[in-house]
């Protein structure tokens, strides 16, 4: 290992040297015969990972950033991580993240802004701790800003935590910091290759070279042609066509490496760290022209300097701030253009000079920079291997994507129960739209870097071949796992808006999966997929149509045939018979399939017929549908509007509710009190939510009552609500930009009010309007204003102010019966001895409701009449007339037995 730069805190790991700064590369004795896997550079400390997974640190330890209390001048092992196989590290100003081979993240050092993600109250953590909130997520990359942290998961999810003063978390403007990892939902669905962080800015890089940045932008370090900070991810459009493969950040500047080996820099340039032979800031990415004659394969950024490695010469170049020797040029001068780092550099596979001491020549393996220090891992001439090439990413640090190697690995397990590890890989891949969107990329000539509104970047033949290789009868357990993941995880989470064109690819490739064409999974996979497709917003749908329009005819026909088969399948079910309770959802399914075919037909026609128009014919329709009647129904619908919709039904219920009041009739309509409030133009409240959905209401009350200030960190809510819509989960914003608005102590009442308003008003607006109209047809007028909501409710469903003696007093008798008849006397004796629940059951048996009119028992007129037949007969009720047929029972026990038998079986056909 060669080291140079600031040594004042021991951060170079060179031991007890006298110099505060090291002006040119110097060998570190500690690393003799050791291989280095990764290096993380903080502002005043350094972390080294060896190839056996052990971790060593050196430098400043004032804030616990070394993870141990040993010597600070030379690398000392972090014993707390001894049981872990660490594969990568990253350092902030004074904190460190370490990633093990299982995808677990450990953190230590300064935690002033929650940058450790540990939800602790301590200012700093001196011993590495596992970030437990990420323990169920397999992380493949971590990146530290000065006071914030990023992580990328195998499922292409980006998590962030720590300071958000400049928007560097990408979660919006409201939260100032986050002490636990938060998913950046606005990036879901994009296949990512890398995360990177600067002082207070952040980047993610997609598999096809698109860059999204956010955070501090005072010097243009986001490359967005201005100096405005960004609080949510923004696409860096100017580099989209440049085939970016790697990105790194300094304190306030950024460098990007292209597939061709070119370097772009932007942001702060005051010390020459952009390499443009000036000290100007650059708000747009600009190519480093002095490196254009060479192919660069590695770049690294320090605080205010940049390094680049050129393998053809074996040389390292550096530029920017040199005051601490971090440029390795032998002086403290700043350099505005790339300048060779001092050293006997030798290219891999180069011709060894004769009569030279091979120990004095260095073949660079990898370069590292950070803070004001720089490092080069090297090998000697006799044992040198090829240097790392950042243009060829390490597979172990990448998201899951479907490729030949991964599928072969899954298929290598014999048929039967899959090992948990493999099942989790399959589930993770097929539960993530980001992973599927990063699969099957067109790698010949790097075509996928041309991804845009006209070109998908997908190799459709590869998609077909790999899907068919994976889904086969010999491995049913794999097919079952894939189906379950698509059905339960991926498709229900699809949204109508997408963050980027790369998040759209799986709409193109998934129809190639054989499971989509399996009729047994039409209702669980193909139709929900079609629903998500037709619900796409106009812009992403237009892109998908563009991609479809350039498909080869057989591939386009495949999608058409799929949804034709879905239509035929549904029509066959219709012919067999659809239960009334399922007709509505059946109609939605059929509508979805036909809508997809309509979109495909439109694309076909606009594109000059990719396939013959008659390929859209569904010939089975004539056998499954009465075309003549169907045509008549269609014409009538065009003339008179649709069939009986929800609004018509709610209009009718409103009429019934009004008639109940008008006719003093009790109707068992269990509407919440909130409905009657709305009828009287009173606002529903949190108490109404507690009545309607008790657990949600209690949660809202807990949110309001929470006494501490950390509402945002504890509850992790934003101004959205998740709703189920025909089996699909949708996220609705309660206010404008609700997804980006976190709930905190100041706005929590607004959140609860907005939640209540959505539940009782916005979500049911059209249906309530229909109900309201129907109700007021019968019960309109000013007299309604005299009622309280509870009184109006009692008018419809009655009340429970029972007065059983009043009921007896007001009962009328017919036939042989009168009040003093022996059977009547024992009837009332038995009735008054019954428990309350049985008495209520009797009311239900006799009147159709166990409640009484609002005016009380005196307005409930019962009639008891005698019937022929013997004591073996049961009492019979006529609910429309509140009339009881009571046989002439002679003893009390017989009457009790027969009455209870009758009221216990008052519903259904249990006596027949």
Image (cartoon, rainbow, N blue to C red):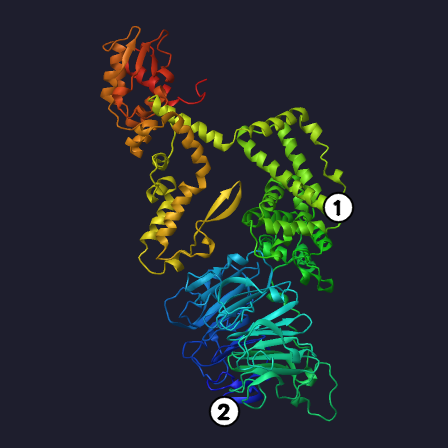
Vertical side of 395 occupied by 798: above or below: above
In front here: 59 or 327? 327
Looking at the rendering, which quadrant does residue 630 occupy?
top right
Q: Label 2, secondary structure: give it.
A: loop
Residue linked to disc 2? 19
Looking at the rendering, which quadrant does residue 195 occupy?
bottom right
The location of residue 233, given as percent across then percent down, is 53, 62
Residue appearing at x 67%, y 53% in the figure: 414
In front here: 314 or 730? 730
- Distance of label 2 from label 1 (alpha carbons): 75 Å
Of the two numbered discs 2 and 1 on the same chain, state the one appearing first in sequence.
Answer: 2
Identify the mark at residue 551; answer none if there is no mark. none
Task: Give the side of residue 683 with respect to residue 102, left or right.
Answer: left
Q: Residue placed farthest to the bottom in the image? A: 355
Mark in the foreground, 2 or 1: 1
The location of residue 364, given as percent across then percent down, is 64, 81
Q: Quadrant of the N terminus?
A: bottom right
Vertical side of 242 occupied by 4: above or below: below
The location of residue 446, given as percent across then percent down, is 71, 64
Task: Give the side of residue 555 with respect to residue 825, left or right.
Answer: right
Whether residue 464 appears in this view of the structure is: yes
Whether residue 415 appears in this view of the structure is: no
| Disc 1 packing (10 Å; few <14; some 14–19; many ≥20) | few
Residue linked to disc 1? 608
| Disc 2 packing (10 Å; few <14; some 14–19; many ≥20) | few
Residue appearing at x 40%, y 79% in the figure: 62
In front here: 51 or 469? 469
């Amino acid at each position: 290992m060669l080291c140079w730069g600031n040594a004042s805190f021991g951060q170079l790991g060179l031991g007890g040297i006298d110099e505060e700064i090291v002006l040119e590369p110097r060998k570190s004795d500690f690393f003799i015969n050791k291989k280095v896997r990764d290096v993380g550079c903080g502002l005043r400390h350094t972390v080294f990972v060896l190839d056996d997974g052990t971790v060593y640190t050196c430098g400043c330890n004032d804030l616990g950033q070394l993870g141990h209390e040993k010597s600070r001048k030379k690398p000392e092992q972090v014993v707390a991580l001894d049981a872990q196989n660490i594969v990568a590290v990253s350092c902030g100003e004074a904190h460190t993240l370490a990633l093990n081979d299982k995808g677990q993240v450990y953190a230590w050092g300064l935690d002033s802004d929650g940058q450790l993600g540990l939800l602790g109250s301590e200012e700093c953590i001196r011993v590495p701790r596992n970030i437990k909130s990420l323990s169920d997520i397999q992380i493949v990359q971590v990146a530290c800003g000065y006071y914030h942290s990023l992580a990328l998961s195998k499922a292409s999810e980006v998590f962030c935590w720590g300071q958000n003063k400049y928007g560097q978390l990408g979660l919006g403007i409201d939260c100032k910091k986050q002490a636990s990892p938060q998913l950046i939902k606005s990036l879901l669905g994009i296949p990512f290759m890398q995360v990177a962080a600067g002082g207070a800015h952040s980047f993610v890089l997609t598999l096809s070279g698109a860059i999204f940045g956010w955070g501090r932008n005072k010097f243009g370090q986001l490359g967005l042609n201005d100096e405005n900070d960004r609080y949510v991810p923004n696409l860096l459009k100017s580099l989209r066509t440049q085939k970016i493969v790697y990105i790194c950040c300094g304190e306030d500047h950024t460098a990007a490496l292209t597939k061709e080996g070119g370097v772009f820099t932007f942001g702060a340039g005051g010390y020459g760290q952009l390499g443009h032979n000036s000290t100007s800031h650059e708000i747009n990415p600009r190519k480093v022209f002095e490196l254009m004659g060479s192919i660069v394969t590695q770049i690294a950024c320090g605080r205010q300097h940049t390094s680049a490695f050129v393998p053809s010469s074996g040389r390292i170049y550096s530029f920017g701030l040199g005051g601490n020797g971090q440029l390795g040029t032998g002086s403290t001068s700043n350099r505005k253009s790339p300048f060779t780092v001092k050293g006997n550099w030798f290219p891999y596979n180069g011709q060894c000079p004769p009569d030279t001491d091979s120990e004095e020549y260095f073949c660079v393996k990898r370069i590292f920079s950070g803070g004001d220090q720089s490092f080069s891992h090297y090998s000697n001439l006799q044992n040198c291997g090829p240097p790392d090439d950042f243009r060829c990413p390490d597979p172990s640090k990448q998201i899951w994507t479907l490729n030949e190697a991964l599928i072969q690995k899954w298929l290598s397990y014999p048929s039967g129960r899959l090992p948990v590890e493999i099942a989790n890989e399959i589930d993770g891949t097929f539960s993530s739209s980001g992973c599927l969107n990063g699969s099957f990329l067109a790698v010949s000539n790097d075509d996928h870097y041309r991804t845009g509104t006209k070109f998908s970047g997908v190799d459709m033949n590869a998609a077909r071949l790999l899907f068919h290789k994976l889904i086969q009868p010999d491995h049913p357990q794999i097919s079952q796992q894939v189906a379950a993941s698509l059905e339960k995880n991926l498709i229900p989470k699809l949204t109508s808006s997408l963050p980027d064109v790369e998040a759209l690819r799986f709409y193109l490739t998934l129809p190639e999966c054989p499971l989509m064409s399996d009729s047994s999974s039409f209702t669980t996979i193909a139709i929900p997929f079609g629903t998500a497709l037709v619900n796409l917003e106009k812009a992403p749908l237009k892109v998908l149509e563009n991609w479809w329009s350039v498909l080869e005819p057989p591939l386009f026909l495949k999608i058409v045939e799929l949804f034709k088969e879905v239509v035929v399948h549904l029509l066959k079910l219709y012919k067999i018979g659809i239960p009334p309770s399922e007709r509505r959802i059946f109609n939605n399914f059929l509508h979805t399939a036909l809508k997809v075919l309509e979109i495909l037909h439109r694309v076909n026609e606009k594109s000059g017929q990719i396939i013959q128009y008659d390929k859209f014919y569904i010939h089975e329709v004539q056998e499954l549908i009465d075309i003549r009647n169907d045509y008549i129904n269609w014409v009538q619908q065009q003339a008179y509007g649709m069939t009986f919709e929800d609004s018509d039904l709610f209009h009718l219920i409103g009429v019934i509710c009004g008639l109940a009041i008008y006719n003093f009739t009790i109707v068992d309509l269990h509407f919440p009190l909130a409905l009657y409030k709305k009828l009287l133009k009173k606002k529903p409240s949190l108490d109404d939510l507690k009545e309607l959905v008790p657990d949600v209401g209690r949660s809202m009350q807990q949110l309001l009552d929470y006494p501490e200030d950390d509402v945002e960190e504890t509850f992790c809510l934003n101004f959205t609500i998740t709703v189920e819509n025909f089996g699909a989960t949708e996220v609705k914003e309660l206010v404008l930009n609700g997804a980006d608005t976190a709930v905190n102590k100041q706005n929590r009442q607004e959140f609860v009010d907005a939640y209540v308003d959505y539940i009782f008003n916005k979500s049911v607006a059209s249906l309530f309007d229909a109900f309201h109209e129907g109700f007021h047809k019968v019960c309109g007028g000013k007299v309604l204003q005299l009622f309280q909501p509870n009184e109006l409710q009692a008018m419809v469903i009655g009340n429970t102010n029972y007065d059983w003696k009043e009921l007896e007093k007001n009962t009328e008798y017919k036939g042989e019966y009168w009040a003093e008849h022996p059977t009547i006397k024992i009837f009332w004796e038995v009735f008054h001895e019954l428990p309350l629940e049985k008495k209520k059951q009797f009311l239900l048996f006799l009147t159709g409701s166990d409640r009484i009119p609002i005016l009380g028992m005196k307005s409930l007129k019962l009639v008891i009449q005698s019937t022929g037949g013997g004591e073996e007969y049961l009492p019979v009720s006529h609910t429309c007339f509140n009339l009881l047929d009571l046989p002439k029972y002679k003893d009390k026990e017989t009457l009790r037995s027969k009455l209870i038998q009758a009221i216990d079986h008052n519903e259904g056909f249990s006596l027949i």
